[in-house]
Amino acid sequence: MNESFRAGDPALSDSRILLGAAALLAVAVFLIDALTPLDIAIAVLYVVVVLLVALTGSRRATLAVAVVCAVLTVIGFLLSKGAHMGGGSLARCVFSLLAIGITSLLAVRNLASNARLREQVQMLDMTHDAIVVYDLNDIITFWNHGAEEVYGWTAAQAIGQPMHSLTQTRFPIPPERIHEELLRNGRWDGELERVRRDGARVVISSRWALWRDGAGKPVAIIATNNDITERQRAEAALAQSEAFLAEAQQLSKTGSIAMRLPEGAMTWSDEAYSIFGYGRDVQPSAERVIERTHPEDLALVQAAREQARAGVPQIDVAHRLLLPDGTVKHVHLVARRTVAAAGRYEYVGALMDVTDTTLTQQALQRTLSELAHVMRVTTLGELAASIAHEVTQPIAAIVTCGDSALRWLNRPQPEVGEATESIRQMIRDARRSSEIIRQIRSMAQKRDPSYAEMDLNALVDESLALVRRELQDHHVEAELRLGEPPALICGDRIQLQQVLINLLMNAVQAMDSVGGRRCLRVATRAADERHVRVEVRDSGKGIAPEDAGRLFNAFFTTKADGMGMGLSICRSIIEAHGGRIWAESPPEGGALLQVLLPLHEPDDGDAAGVAGGNTKGASHEQ
């Protein structure tokens, strides 16, 4: 303990007064003891001098004064008695020295105890907790610095005041029950509402302990208090946020999943439990996910697990779940890796139940397929004359060749070679007729898409052949420019042929109201290293600016009798093949429809992946 005094210390003046009084008393005792003939133990009064110095709180000064008083006692004894020293005088001197020594020891011991007590009080004062002591009548007897910070009153203002009245305490239960528990157990803890000096209401976490005296009688209550107002607000906000999140996850059918690696421990949100069909008592694990995975999609999930073990930055997998009751769910998991401790990392992601969306998309796809079939049949009706011409032409050729073969054979000297050539021509025409009928039947059938490798040039040539009669009837000249070498694509032949025929028919009809030369230009060319382009250009009136953004919208048409679904279906088909379709109005006039398709890459498999088809430019008659 620091026993020095600083300037301005209020204890300094009191200590000086005590030291001055002690010095005067010591001088008086010495003079009386040394110069008067009193035969009493006047030196015992040095005890008072020691006690006065002890009141200053300095153990060093107390011990020094005790030594001085002992020396003065001996000197006074020698001066007053001289050669006439008797046994009684010596006994009184010794008694005085013992009194001074014992008093000094007790005083120093008391000072040490007081110093320890002050240190303990200072420690209580330094803590951030609000520590308050009040007696059983609720009167405050101790109020530390933490209490000043929490409640706003200083110790001088609070000590002597009733605790619960000063702070306007609101108890969670009746105070009588709290005191009963305190007397029974010696402790109580709970949350209280109190009012600060500035009028602000705070929530206090309070812990009470009953203080008993040596006889075991309750004398006071020691209360440790903490302001938890902000914590409660944060907890309430967190609880509200969690409730909102849980509600949002339930509404959106999206659960949260976390997985720590390499140990593989998992955490699921409530909605994730619901999606998997497990109760909250089930411990999340990868094995539980496997149990719910549809057998046909196990390979997808296993591959995603291997990706996680390899530490890929992001996992994206869509698969099906098969629940015990036979219900099939479609789910989509997207997870991102986060950095954790060395050698450890965590994936945090969202598990979305996309069953409704998937079923809706499947129903929409079926509807689009049926609509596309209807449009194909409708197109076949429009091409009836062209089809009849394409079929009857080879049949007529067969009849002509047959007659020629008979004439060659019926000659006096049969011309077998000429007859054979006529028969071969008959076979070629029959095959051509059969191929046309096959194409027509394929277009009329309702079936699922079938993707295969094909020559784009041949597909364009076949489509143009089917509308040849329409070109003749509308006096349209066709210019065909096919890129070399032929581009190989992967797709459904019937669907792509439907797109081409629709574009060709639209171009022919767009030139109906145009006088002069009508020209239809069809070309294929490489767009880049991975794509090929088909261009269909007419010499019609072009695309009206107001129709530019609506060309591929469903039910938009510029025809009086049009359905407005032709180009919309074309866009759906092209996008399903990983390509895109758009229209432009070239400066030289007319309309230009362009189709971009990916080239076939054997290593990539089918080109049936869905790609985002951008449409730009303009409208065209459908």
Image: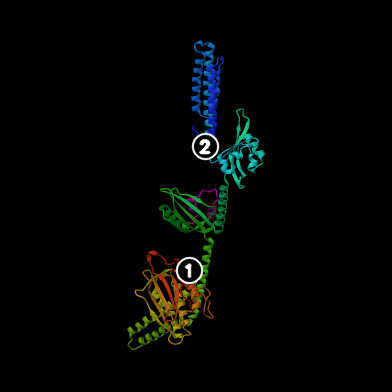
Residue nearest the viewer, comparing 416 with 370: 370
- Looking at the image, the residue that sits furthest to the bottom is 412
Name the side, left or right, on which 110 lies relative to 518. Answer: right
| Residue 459 in view here | no
Upstream in sequence: badge 1 or badge 2: 2
SS for tag 1?
loop
SS type, badge 2 = loop
**Which stretch did the figure color magenta?**
272-294
Does residue 203 appear in this view? Answer: yes
Q: Which image quadrant for residue 482?
A: bottom left
Residue 264 located within the stretch drawn in magenta = no
Q: Could you tell me residue 69's position as x and y percent?
A: 51, 21
Measured Cα–Cα span from mark 1 to mark 2: 100 Å
How many marks are shown on the rendered structure? 2
The numbered mark at residue 8 is 2
Residue beneath disc 1: 448
Q: Which mark is in front, 1 or 2?
A: 2
Residue 324 image label: none
Q: Position of residue 11 (x, y in %)?
A: 54, 33
Q: Give the residue displayed 34% in from the left and 74% down from the top.
A: 485
Judging depth in this view, the residue of 273 and 322 nearest the camera is 273
Say if 478 sits above or below 213 in the image. below
- Amino acid residing under circle 1: Asp
Considering depth in this image, is 154 or 252 the residue closer to the camera? 154
Work out which residue is located at the far front of the displayed protein and give it.
35
User: What x and y, as percent, mark residue 174?
Assistant: 67, 41
For disc 2, the neighbor class at 10 Å (few under 14, some 14 to 19, many from 20) is few
Q: Look at label 2 and name its amino acid.
A: Gly
Q: Could you say where residue 70 lies in the image, as x and y percent from the top left? A: 50, 20
* Residue closest to the eye, 162 or 606: 162
Q: Are marks 1 and 2 in contact (CB under 8 Å)?
A: no
As for residue 286 lying within the magenta part, the answer is yes
